[in-house]
Image (cartoon, rainbow, N blue to C red):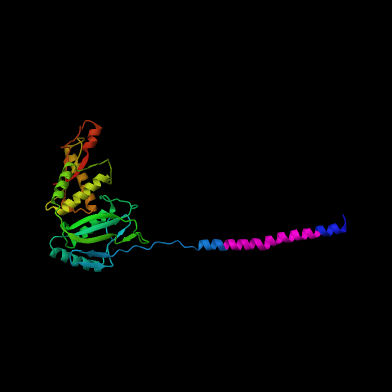
Amino acid sequence: MSKKLLYLLGIIGTILLGTYFYWKFCCNPCCEVGACKQKKKVENVSTIIPATTFLPFQVKDVNGNLSLSVEDNFNFKQSGLNYLQPVSTNLDHEIEKLKEYLTSQEGKTLSVTGFYQSDETNNSAFPNLGLARANSIKNYLKDKGISSKLIDTYSQLNDEMVADSLNVFHGPLSFEVLASVDNSEKLKLTANEIKENPVVLYFKTGQANINLTPEQRSKIADISMYLDKVEGAMCLVTGHTDKTGDATHNILLGQNRADFAKQYLITNGISGDKIIATSKGQTEPIADNGTEEGRAKNRRTVITIN
């Protein structure tokens, strides 16, 4: 091999080695730095957290001269049916004004609409948490001196609400004063429906909770409304058993089941003063006690009205 060729190969080798080491120690770190900067830039993009929804307490009578407003309102835990305490003094002051207005004006009713979200868990006795929340506020207003006869409760789905970091909804309600309407015919129809098709609960041995069907929830809401609107109306809760065992013991067993159902209704905002819990024991079977299926049907608690 000639000396000239060796020089040429040496030059080519030097160029190749230089190119390799330049890429290794210069370009690659630069790329990595760029990648880090890009990664850091991506990581620094903050997640946008929606602002908490704050709905003030506002009541207007579009056909009158009432207009109340205060920033405070009733608050509820997410999936909760009872308002959180304490209630602010400012809110109570506005409620006092509302009471004075309703008691001084004839032909007026207060509409209370509770909001709820589709992803909340409804453990109440009502069809949805909106109606349960409205009923909770109705009871508070009743305690403040506003007759429940003057309060109508409704519900509305509102998935736009945003709870705070403690999962609390601030003011998931709306209020409005409206002209009263005659609902006597509706109340008669409601009473007939409840009496003809009462809520019937079947208890399994050791059962510690009550799970209502959608139809039963709707009927509980009707019972609650009827008790508010009709003077002297009472909710009747009657426990029944099968014929197994001693008759005296079965009276006690039926009473325990009736008391359990009564407490469930009280927990869901129906006044205990409006509920009568009794037991018929084994005296009113609706099926054959000679079969297991029949005995299961006889072990029941019936919720209706007088």
- Residue drawn at point x = 19 percent, y = 58 percent: 151
- Residue drawn at point x = 17 percent, y = 44 percent: 193
Is 75 left, or right, of 276 in this rendering? right
Quarter of the image holding residue 104? bottom left
Seen from the viewer's position, the closer of residues 147 and 202 is 147
Residue 142 appears in view: no
| Magenta residue check for 32 | yes
Residue span colored magenta: 10-36
Residue 115 appears in view: yes
- Residue drawn at point x = 21 percent, y = 60 percent: 140
Residue 96 sits above or below residue 273 on the image? below
What x and y, as percent, mark residue 192?
15, 44
| Magenta residue check for 83 | no
Q: How many marks?
A: 0
Toward the front, the furthest residue is 63
Seen from the viewer's position, the closer of residues 193 and 183 is 183
Q: Main secondary structure of the magenta part?
A: helix
Is 187 left, or right, of 51 in this rendering? left
Seen from the viewer's position, the closer of residues 208 and 110 is 110
Is 92 left, or right, of 160 in this rendering? left
